[in-house]
Structure formats: structure tokens, C-alpha cells
Image (tube, grey):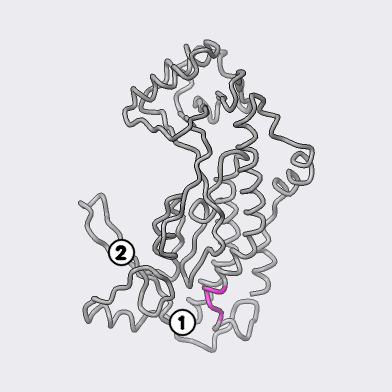
Amino acid sequence: SRGKGGKGKGKRDDDDDDDDDDDEKNIIGNKMVRVRTLNRSKDNAVETKTCKVLIGADGIKSVVRTLLFGEQRQLKYHGKMMFRAVMGLHRIDQGICAAAGISTAYQGEENGKLFAFRETAKGILTFTAMSLFEEPDLLHDANDRKKRLKELFSDYPSEVVGHIIERMPPSSLYENAVHDLEVEEQWSDGPVLLIGDAAHAMTPGMGQGANQGLEDACELAIVLAPALLLHAETKGTEQTQTYNNSSSSTTKDISNVLELFWRGRIDRVKEIHAASRARTASVNQSSSKSAAYSEKDKLSFTNRLYQWKPTSLTLAQQL
């Protein structure tokens, strides 16, 4: 929830006691955020904290996003279920898994169906599988999930069914339906910001969901850290000017920094989001993994995707 004077649509603590009101008088510029949480390790005890910036990195079903903008977003389902597991490499026979750094993928004639695995860390095997489903169908029992996976890939080679799926601990299997959200047109309001899936959840078609969240974090750190340090240095000393010798540095508003951050990110994220959605649709309609790539994807777009450099380095010099 937002402190008094905030601009968000989240709940406001209008029933605070006098002590809380006194505390709020000491909040720098009335721009602090007050957050009430439930501590699950303490029987859901209610805890209240304040912060200069609240970063909502809480995923596709973001609570912060709902509090910030007042409504739950509609998830778009893409007709596919994903199945993932991490297990010890010792569980399967030697030679089944290729050397570290090499991924093995099996794909039959059925559209949108794939099973891939590799050694992701020393002694650790990770697999990813996918199959089309008209509607999401998540199973709660771990043994039922394993049984269904065996049935889905029963016609695949023994390396898949007999070694990996059969020897996989049921509790290690994670399944989810493939959804995404339209990219938010606004990621911040005052000192509250959305990043990652909370702002731009995308399909796994380009393998870029987590990467874009990491890019968000990298770019945000470059511009936010100096702004926070600046506020700390100028607290109670309006004459102190230490960052880039800027004469107006004490009046820099963190909310402006947050807005500059996401405005510098949104076009790139929208392009990758659209490409990911398009590739997911293409893979769903094909039994060839490479069918989703066009020459344009392989050249100009791929270059832009993988030759990324933080644009916020330039922005930080301007603040």
C-alpha cells in the first residue's frame, strides 16, 4: 500500500494511528512507499515496511501491478503445456546425455511437441518438454504428472522414456501452461516500478523471458543506484552537490528516473515480445523446430537481440 501523498491506486493507510502519522511527517518528500506483507514463516503475521522505491518483480500474476493499476490483466493462453525437471545425472546411464554444453532434442511428426535435455551444471541434467493442449490442464499430484508425461512421450526413443522420464523423481517435475501478457504501456507510478514478467511476460518461444528481466535489472541498477545515493547524500543538506556536479541534483525525482528507465526499455521489449509470440505460434503449427526462423530473424533481429548493450549508461550520464 502507498504512503499518504502517493499517486498510486493501491490501498492507502487512512486508519493509521498517531505514531504512524508522525512517522510519515519524516518521510523524505512524501515519496516513500509503505508495504504491508504477510510473513509466512511467522504464521502470516502482518508486517509493515517502508522504502524509497518498491520494485514489483513478482511475475505474470503480479500483485504489485494489480495494486498499482487497479485491475488484474487478462492472460493469453497459447495452446501449449511445458514440462521441466532438474535431476542428478547419475540417475541415467552413462552416454545418454551428451557432453556439457551440448543439448539433445527429439521432435516427432506431431506439431508443437518436443523433448530436449542437457547437462546444465556438473552432474546436473535438465530437461524441457512441450506438447499442445487445447486448454490448460495442470495436475496437482506429482505421480500423476509423471504418469501423464510418460504417456505423452511413449512413442519417443528409450533415452527419453526409459531413462530420463522413468528415472526422474516425480517431485522434481514442474509443469505450466504457456501464457503471456501484453506489454504494459506504463511500468511505473511515482516510486513504484514493475520489471520482468510483471511488466512484460512473454512466451518461451525465443527463450528471452528471464533474459529480459535480467536486462531490466541491469539497466535499472545503472540509473537507480546513483539516484538513491544522491538522495542519501543530500538528506538534510540541500547545498551538497556531489553527482556529476549537477546544480539541480537535489531536485532530481526518483520517480522521473524510473520513468526514464522504462521508456528507454519498452520498444526493445515490445519487439522481442512480439517475436516470441510469433515464434510460439509457428512452432505450434510445425513439427520442425527450425521452421520458426526466417532469414530476417537470423540476421537483423538476432543481431539486435544478442548484441545488446545497456542504453542506460548514456542516460545515467545525463542525470
In this picture, is 296 found above or below 266? above
Indicate whether residue 255 is drawn in magenta: yes
Residue type indicated by callout 1: Lys
| Residue at the spot 60% in from the left edge and 22% down from the top edge | 105
Who is closer to the viewer here, 262 or 108? Answer: 108
Judging by the rendered image, the residue that carries numbered circle 1 is: 235
For mark 1, give the secondary structure.
Answer: loop
- Residue 133 is tagged as none
Where residue 253 sits in the image (x, y, percent)?
Answer: 53, 78
In magenta, the rendered stretch is: 252-256
**Of the image marks 1 and 2, the number of the one nearer the N terminus:** 2
Say which amino acid is labelled 2: Arg
Look at 45% across and 86% down and name the residue there.
236
- Of residue 54 and residue 227, the one placed in the foreground of this image is 54
CA distance for labels 1 and 2? 26 Å
List x then y, in percent, for residue 295: 79, 38
Tell me the residue that label 2 is attached to: 36
